[in-house]
Amino acid sequence: MTYAPMKPTKPGYEEPHEQIRKIRITLCSNNAKNLEKAAKAKAIRVKGPVRMPTKVLRTRKAPCGEGTNTWDRFEPRIHKRLIDMYSTPDVVKQVTSITMEPGVPVDV
């Protein structure tokens, strides 16, 4: 005599479904347009890109550091964006293995 497996009837005992996870990705670049382009390139349910404050690095004119404080006009700006992705672990592995844009480092 063979027995058929019983299906659980109580709530909370259902079979686990593939879990959707939230992943936060940080993108940094000197070019803000590359960041926006890289963020919107993937067709996954995302929140963002959230714009973080732009970091401005000022440079001194005098190389020795003595004398009056004169600052050069050259100011490299570093733009930062945060993206929250909601997807399954398989899709997450695919997205994190792909480089977004040249010159845009990705932190997961």
Image (spheres, rainbow, N blue to C red):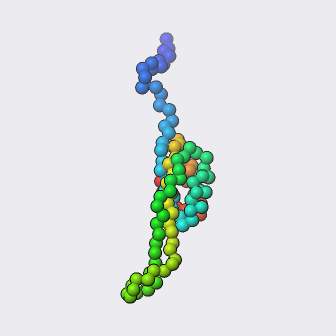
Q: How far from the left and from the top, in percent, is residue 52?
A: 47, 58
Tell how many labels.
0
- Closer to the camera in the image, 21 or 5: 21
Quarter assignment of residue 68:
bottom left
Residue 12 percent location from the top left of the image: 42, 26
- For the point 62% across and 52% down, which residue is it? 41
Question: What residue is rendered at 59% in x and 63% in y?
Answer: 102
Query: Would you say residue 11 is visible in this rendering?
Result: yes
**In front of the other: 45 or 48:** 48
Q: Is residue 27 above or below residue 23?
A: below
Q: Which one is in front, 14 or 104? A: 104
Residue sitting at 47 percent across and 18 percent down? Answer: 6
Q: Position of residue 69 (x, y in %)?
A: 40, 83
Q: Position of residue 55 (x, y in %)?
A: 46, 66
| 61 in relation to 106, above or below | below
Which residue is the extreme one toward the left?
66
Query: Going by the picture, which residue comes out furthest to the top?
Result: 1
Let me know if residue 103 appears in the view.
Answer: no
Q: Please tell me whether residue 22 is drawn above or below residue 98 in the rendered image.
A: above
Left/right placement of residue 5 relative to residue 36 reads left
Write the residue at 52% across / 41% down: 88
